[in-house]
Image: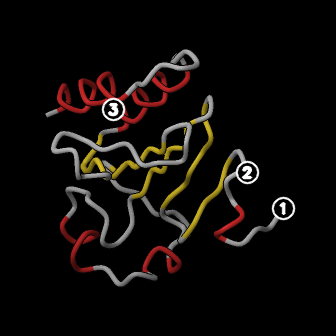
Amino acid sequence: MKRKTSNQIDDAGFTCGNNSNFQMNINGFRISIAFGPGCHVSDRDIRFNSDFDAPFNHMIWGSSDAEVLIWDRNGDPINWDDGVQQVCGMCSPDTVARFIGCLVNCPDGDDPTNALRQINMAQV
């Protein structure tokens, strides 16, 4: 098993953390899917009332939705609707899958930001 420190994860295809999030590299982009305490999820107990280390006390930790952060091919976070927000919260599994599909199919040199924003708006 490969172990890395947090500042050395960029070349790993998959990483996970805190028993409640994971990241993956896709076609030069990086996506983070997080659903632990403090994350922008619809379950208020998870979001506001769970201790940060609560996921470690469970064999399986889950949520009906997740927050998503996507980095572009230059390593910069993609900004959502207001140009400032970098995390897209309360994303359903279908929305996350659509984000991944968009990133997989994004040609070199193209910017998927508008397509990702449309996917996000379609879930609202």
Labelled disc at residue 95: 3
Q: Amino acid at mark 2?
A: Ala
Residue 117 coordinates in the image, percent (x, y): 26, 30
Q: CA distance from mark 3 to mark 2?
A: 24 Å
Q: Amino acid at mark 3?
A: Thr
Marked residue nearer the N-terminal end (3 or 1): 1
Question: Mark 1 highlights which residue?
Answer: 2
Above or below residue 17? Residue 89 is: above
Q: Decide which of 102, 37 is in the foreground and name it.
A: 102
Q: CA distance from mark 3 to mark 1?
A: 30 Å
Above or below residue 13? Residue 4 is: below
Residue 43 coordinates in the image, percent (x, y): 22, 61
| Residue 22 sits in quarter | bottom right
Query: In the picture, which quadrant includes the N terminus?
Result: bottom right
At a point 42% along the width and 48% down the height, the residue shown is 77
Are there few (<14), some (14-19), or many (20+) residues within 10 Å of tag 2? few
Q: Give yes or no for contact between labels 1 and 2 (Cβ–Cβ under 8 Å).
A: yes
Labelled disc at residue 12: 2
